[in-house]
Image: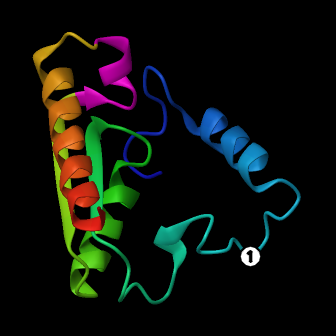
Amino acid sequence: MRTFIDTPLWNRPAAELSWRYYLGAERGDVSPYAAPARAHRLAGLPPTYIGTSDQDPVRDEGILYALRLAEAGVSVELHHFPGTFHGSNVLAPDAAVSRRQQAELHAALRRALTRVL
C-alpha cells in the first residue's frame, strides 16, 4: 500500500486483518502460493488478468505485479479503471464503469476457459 491507504471500502487496518486471517500463524516468510506477487521467478505462470482502481490500497502492487509478469514473458492483461475505488463495482453495480469492469473480467474468464476446455 503506497498511495491510497484509506479508501471508502478498504483501508490499511482491514488489509492487515485480512492478511492475518488469510495467513494464520504463518505470517513470517509468505509463500508465493499465498501471495504470487512475492515470487522471485514468475516465468511460466499462466496468463493473468489484473484489474486496478484509482483509489485502491493495492493498486500499486497490482500494477507492479503486472509489469513483472510481462517482463518474465507471461501473458498479462492489466485493466485500470479511473475514478473507481476498491470494491466500487460492488457498491455501485449499475454504474457504467462497474458494468465495464464486469464485462472485461467476464471476457477474460471466457478467453481463459476457452483455452483450457
Where 93 sits versus 86, above or below? above
**Corner quadrant of residue 82:** top left
**Residue 86 falls within the magenta-colored stretch:** yes
The residue located at (32%, 67%) in the rendering is: 64
Q: Looking at this view, name the residue that lies furthest to the right.
A: 25
Q: Is residue 10 above or below residue 39?
A: above
Observer-nearest residue: 72 or 2? 72
Residue 101 left/right relative to 88: left
Expressed as whole percent of the image width and height from the top left, the position of residue 21 reads 77, 44
List the residue tagged with mark 1: 29
- Measured as percent of width and height from the top left, residue 29 is found at 74, 76
Q: Nearer the viewer, residue 114 or 106?
A: 114
Q: Quadrant of the C terminus?
A: bottom left
| Span of residues in magenta | 84-92
- Magenta span includes 91: yes
Q: Residue at x 20, y 74 (%)?
A: 75
Amino acid type of the residue tagged 1 in the rendering: Asp
Q: Quadrant of residue 45?
A: bottom left
